[in-house]
Image (cartoon, rainbow, N blue to C red):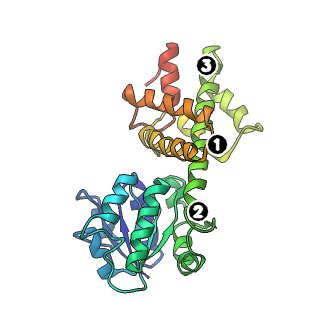
Amino acid sequence: MDVSVLGLGQMGTAIAERLIRAGHQVSVWNRSKGKADSLVVEGAFELAAAHQAWDRSDVCITMVADSQALADIALAPGGGIAHTASGKGKTLIDMSTVSAEVSREVADAAAGAGVEYLRAPVSGNPGVVRAGNLTIIASGEDAVFTSVESLLRDIGPQVFYAGEGDAARIIKLALNLMVAGTAELLAECVALAESHDVRRDKLLEVVAASAVASPLVKYKIGPLLADDYTSTFSSRLMHKDLDLVLGAAAAGGVPMPVTGVVHQLLQACISTGLGELDFMSLLVRLQRESGQTSV
C-alpha cells in the first residue's frame, strides 16, 4: 500500500520504519528538516510539503505532538491535508493524542472534502513500536476501520475498534491518566523505601512479583535500577495529555482529584528543569524535595 507518515518524532519515525519493513511504499514529512534522513536510507520518499502526501498515497497517517500541530497540518487554509485531497478514496488516520474538539474539526473538514477519517491513538513508546507490541485504539466509521485494519496491524498487532466518533480519543486519555497516576505511586513507593535505607533492587524485586505489578511497572524497573530517566515519553508530553484529560473531564462534569494532583506535580517537574526527561522524573522531584541524592 502507498502510505504517507507526517510527523517524524520518536513515534512517527518508529511507525514509518514498521511500515517500510512490512513492504509498504512509504512517503514521509516533518516540519523540521533532517528527521527523514534515516528513513530515506531505508527506502522512504521525503515530501517537500505535507499536502503532497495525497499525490503519492491513498492513506495518510499523522503522528504529531499536540492538538495545535494537528490543526496546523490538517486545517491550514489552502494546504490542510483534511481538505486538499483530490477525489474520493483517500483516508486520513490520526494516531496522535489530541483533543476531541480539534479532532471533530478535522473530521468536519475531511467530510467536506470526501476524505475518510479514522482516529487511531496509540498506547506505547518507540521501543514498543519497534518490538511489534504497540496497542492501537481506533474509532470512526466501521467501514473505514475495516479498510485499513491490516495496515494498522502492520504497525502494531493489538488493534481495538472502539466505535464511532471520537471514542478512541477518550479511551486513550483514560489510559494515560492511569499511566501518570501509576508513575507517581511508583515514585512514592521508591522514595519511601529509600528514605528508610531499603535497597532499590530489593524493593523492585518484590514489587515485580506482587499484586501491584503491571506491564507498565515492570517496564520501568530496568530504568529505575539504572537511575536512567532518558525519555520514552517526556514529562512535558504527559503534562499535555493530562491537560486533555482534565478538559474532557470538565466537559463531562466528572471530578478528577487524583489526576489533578498528578498534573500539578508534572508541572513542578517542568518548572524545575525536568520537562524533557521521562515522566518518571516524578521520582527525581520527590528525591529533590526529600533531600535524597538524585540526578
Q: Residue at x 43, y 61 (%)?
A: 14
Say which element carries label 2.
Answer: strand
Q: Which comes before the other along the chain, label 1 or label 3?
A: 3
Nearest the eye: 231 or 86: 86
**Picture coordinates of residue 171, whole percent (x, y):** 61, 55
Are the two marked residues, 3 and 2, in contact with CB atoms closer than 8 angstroms? no
Residue at numbered disc 1? 218
Residue 96 visible? The answer is yes
- Residue 69, compared with residue 77, is above or below; it is above
Dividing the picture into quarters, in which one does residue 86 lie? bottom left
Distance from the alpha carbon under mark 3 to that under mark 2: 38 Å
> Is residue 17 rendered to the left or right of residue 83?
right
Distance from the alpha carbon under mark 1 to that under mark 3: 19 Å
Q: Amino acid at mark 1?
A: Lys
Residue at numbered disc 3? 194
Dividing the picture into quarters, in which one does residue 270 lie? top left
- Residue 137's mark? 2
Say which element carries label 3.
Answer: helix
For the N terminus, which image quadrant?
Answer: bottom left
Q: Depth-wise, is mark 2 or mark 1 nearer the camera?
A: 2
Q: Amino acid at mark 3?
A: Glu
Say which element carries label 1.
Answer: helix
> Is residue 127 rendered to the left or right of residue 72?
right
Q: Badge 3: how crowded within 10 Å, few (<14), some, or many (20+)?
A: some
